Image (tube, grey):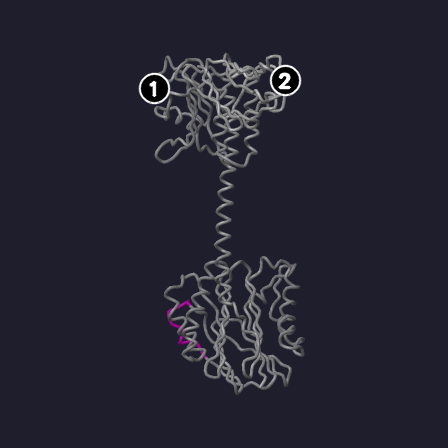
Amino acid sequence: MKVGIQFHCQSGPLKGSVFDCPPGEKIIFGRHPLCNIVLDSDEEASRQHAELSFEEGPTLKDLNSTNGVLVNDQPILSHTLSRGDRFLVGTTLFYVESIVLGADKKISDSKESMINTLLNLQKILVQEKGDLIKTALEATFEVLPASRLAVMKKTSDGFKITHFVCQQGSSEKGLSSTFASKVWESNEALLMESTDDLSTEDWGETIALHSVRSIVGVPLHNKKGETFGVILGDNQVNPNALKPRHVDLLRFLGRSLETLFQKIHLDQLEKEQRKIQADLSLAQKVQNQLFRDPPSGSYGAYECQVIYQSAKEIGGDYYGMRVHENRIYWTVADVCGKGVPAALIVSMLKGASNILAERGQSPSQLLTELNRVLQPDTPRSMFATCFSFDLHEVGLLRFSNAGHPPGLLLRKKTGKIEELKRTGSPLFISPSISENLKEESVKLQPGDRILVYTDGLTEAMGSHGDFYGEEKLYDSFLESSHLPLSEQKSHIYEKVLQYETNNSLGDDKTLLLVEYTP
């Protein structure tokens, strides 16, 4: 077999020119007009500077030039070129695009060439762009006395060729799946130097039908050591072409490919993660629209202050406020879990609450309707605790508590806290909650303050693994009662954050403060 070569010029007047040199020809570089590649404007080039011949592969020789010949920045007298080499003649730089494989190709698999191939494979492993598996396969094929070389992955339907390179006149057709299967089953490299005495009963008919004279295969393993494919090479011209040293070469190629496959897998995971992150960012923007106008401020006889912080990009806490016919309607909910599933339930709560609040329903009626509307479409494993209350301008508080942590009512006159306890079970557990959901009313006095929160505050975890707890929350509510409402909100929340050792592992947090200020 003989070798042709394709290269292009990267500098000088010939920049961009592509040269296809078939096997059997000699190519002379120089300034003389009779040279094959004339470098007449290159003052550093000799009249006959270098020769490219093909006795033992594409060999570049220095013809006793004045300034020498460089291959990959190293001076040479004679050098067998490989794909990716750069060679400098005078000041004109050329780049080897490919080695063209002819029907009579003779590949140099000398010790030097084999070592160069191993070094090239190492370089390929650190590259970032291109089809690195194909590049590694081509680099190995240049020194492997084979007609074909393929990467074959095992599937439920047999072996699938994922990467393939061959000499001219050969094709994928007739690669032996039987041989690949034996490599797979044995999980060891197999070499058949000559197929002259092959038993078709043991090895099938494909090898004989497609004139395979010598064949080799090595298994490919994933990170866990499991076999996932095979590298298979064969020679359709010469028996005894493939030798044990070529098994070692393919083993090294296999280890390189295993690294590349793992790298590709990690790249795919990173792309998927980036897509997930982009989707979460978009979901976060959508959810932020639910809370785009934090209803802190004064509303008639009441001042309201609220803080909301999700533990992840999107959260499972919800708060909503509506003013309807001289009443302020508040709903605070905590959907079990975090992330996307909880956020979807929050979106459902938001939409349904907005519609139902316009009807002017009482807190217990609102929660009963939320449960009736949303329970059929909520996964059975999910539920939500919910505290709903309304405030009349004359200081009347009505509330209904569906499994939520108790609301806290701090009396201005006595300085004592009253609990607005649970009056029913969480939402979405059963189709109807009206039987066990109660509603209570409380008369407020000027200066009285209400605290409604989700359990992300009381279950904030400290350095010893213990929760912040209700007692600390009550204490911070009491000790900050002299502060303006906005400052009290910050004080209570900062106390929780100071206690929590790793906020990234915490739960969603919602804190609502209301003061009656007629």
Image quadrant in which the N terminus is located: top left
- Under mark 2, the amino acid is Gly
| Quadrant of the image occupied by residue 236 | top left
- Where does label 2 land, which residue? 68
Considering only vertical position in the picture, is 72 above or below 462?
above
| Quadrant of the image occupied by residue 413 | bottom right
The spot of residue 42 in percent (x, y) is 60, 22
Considering only vertical position in the picture, is 470 above or below 110?
below
* 198 on left or right of 420: left
Of the image marks 2 and 1, the number of the one nearer the N terminus: 2
* Residue appearing at x 62%, y 14% in the figure: 65
Considering only vertical position in the picture, is 450 above or below 257?
below
Q: Residues within 10 Å of mark 2 (few under 14, many from 20)?
A: many
- Under mark 1, the amino acid is His
The spot of residue 200 in percent (x, y) is 33, 18
* Residue appearing at x 49%, y 44% in the figure: 269
* 379 on left or right of 30: left
Residue 434 highlighted magenta (yes or no): yes
Instruction: Give how far apart the Cα atoms at labels 2 and 1 are.
Output: 47 Å
Considering only vertical position in the picture, is 104 above or below 355?
above
The spot of residue 292 in percent (x, y) is 52, 67
The spot of residue 242 in percent (x, y) is 46, 16
- Number of the label disc, if any, that sits on residue 210: 1
Q: Main secondary structure of the magenta part?
A: loop
Q: Secondary structure at mark 2?
A: loop
Near-viewer residue (291 or 400): 291
Image quadrant in which the C terminus is located: bottom right
Near-viewer residue (231 or 32): 32
Q: Secondary structure at mark 1?
A: loop
Q: Which residues are magenta?
A: 428-438
